[in-house]
Amino acid sequence: MFKNINPLKWRTSTKALWMSFLLPMVIMLTYFASRHMAPFGSSSILTVDLGQQYIDFYAGFRQTILHDPLRIFYDFSKGLGGETYGDWAYYLLSPTNFLLLPFSNVHLPAAILLLTVLKYGLAGWSFAFAIRKMHWQIGWRLPLFAISYAFMGWFVANDLNLLWLDAAILLPLIITGLENYLTHEKGWPFVVALTAVIIVNYYMAYMIGFFLILYFIWRLTWQPYRFKQRLTMLRRFLLGGIVSIGLATIVWLPTAYTLMNSKGQHMLANLSWKFEYQPADILGKLFLGTFNFEQMPSGLPNIFIGSLPIIILWFFFTLRNIRWQTRVVAFVITAILVISMMYAPLNLLWHGFQFPVWYPYRFSYLFSFWILWLVASIWSPYLRLSWYQFLTLLILASGVFIYLFSRIGDLNFITAAQLYIGGGFFIVLLLLHILPAKIKFWLPAVTLIVIGEMTTSTVWTLNNFSYLTNTEYQTYIRSLNNITKHLPKSSTDFYRVAQSFQRTKGDPLQGNYQGASTFSSALEHQQSDIMAAFGQPEGDNYIAYSSGTLMTDSLLGMRYLLQPTGNQPTVSGTPTNMQTYSRSDTNGNYQLVNQTKQAILSQNPNALPLGFAASDNV
């Protein structure tokens, strides 16, 4: 019994799986600590949407789970009030979110950092577990692939989009479950993993569904199966998929209805039948650190996976020991994925017939997984390139280097330093794959080089972003908490709260009150329409009641108003520093309720209730 719980007695592969889980976590924890991010200092992990949208949803998640579960279905903190089941299905159904519950909204940045680190570890473990289950890699080879997967360009570039990362974590388990089902008739691992990804994030699951079709076609080429065997495999594949979709209906069906009333109304808008950039430029994304802020709105796909997979991929396609049918179909699938990442109609297909707002080519993690999966299926420490393979790959790599060097001035994501450093890693690994197979310390050397390249790319990428300071965030949230605690709490009394300062459009979620601002991908178009009529800022996925008047306050039931005191206007995070609009029109009309050092709470005596009678003329 003690052998099972004593690490010193574990088998090598078990230790390697633990290393595959812990190594990415230690590296990322060390990096975040070096950047003094909370809980290690005054900085934070908050940046872009993570700091402007997701953290507010996490605050609302805590409030809902701990105090008011019915808000899963409808919440007046969502703008003027709206259904929230679609928001939960897109943003909040990851089971890892429950780890946030012990942390108050003031300390959420630290909790989110720890959650991000955990997801890096889970991604590494998931891929290592899958290739071990396939009997492709064993022992200390596993951490090598774990690092390559956890630190692939897509995962690092999107570590601020925590809601998407679960798909990359579950994908290796889905594929392993499918393999088990096709060969051993045990369908539950496939069904459970596929159902889980549909429930956790239907958006990413949609992309995985298309990929599974391509993968299954390739899977049929592994052996010269008889026609009856192919039919049996097809039946299992379809049955498992249908059962998974059926089990997840409780999430995706009502969410689909919600989307048709929000984003779905713009499907196929502005479709153009063209390549979205110069195709050869995608080769630059194979180099380390090629993601920055300029790449977020309209950049190229993030497909960095390191030098080793590129070398072994060439070996895969030129190795005659692999069935030619398997290689040909693998090449076709690779080509489909690559073309999809540059040709507009195919790109639109992968994104549910709707162009993404920022973070383009969100499905590129499937390409990275696919390449690493092919490589893991054939690589071993004893694999050596022939002189033909070595020279042809060296010539191709030289051509890529020369092309990209000539394009540096036109590409905003790559520099000469990245080309030289990336080329250096590539050359060293290429040379190691033509050296004699029995050189001592060959595997540790390759592993260290891979870890070095992937870590360098990760640090380079994350250093390209600016982050919100934890001090600024906590200053604002404490100020908001201190003033909103004076709002009356009653389950039978409805009112809304206006504000003339704002950190984000999700402030009502943070302060646990009914406001009239929100930022959600599942926002009903009617909310945007009425805010446009009132002359308030609005868009397809947000509304902001930031410049109210006496009339609109009354019509919308804004019984209370939050205003800054004017103190510390130059201090980041204070309500005065975050003021959006002066409400001097309320002077003498609204009654003072409470005042703190940073904020004022006043009451509007003319606020109308949620429902009221009015003349037809009005």
Image (cartoon, helix red, strand yellow):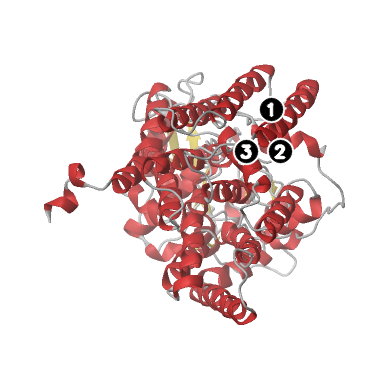
Disc 1 + disc 2, Cβ < 8 Å: yes
Q: Residue tagged by mark 2?
A: 300
207 relative position to 247: left or right: right
Distance from disc 3 to disc 2, alpha carbons, whole Å, reads: 19 Å
Q: Residue 579: image x %, image y %?
A: 55, 31
Q: Quadrant of the C terminus?
A: bottom right
Whether 537 is drawn above or below 440: the answer is below
In the rendered structure, which amino acid carries the disc numbered 3? Ile
The amino acid sitting under disc 1 is Phe
User: Which of the numbered marks, if any, corresponds to residue 219?
Assistant: none
| Spatial separation of the CA atoms under disc 1 and disc 3 | 20 Å
Residue furthest to the left = 2
State the SS at label 2.
loop
Give the secondary structure at mark 1: loop
58 or 411: nearer the eye?
Answer: 411
Residue underneath mark 1: 413
Q: Secondary structure at mark 3?
A: helix
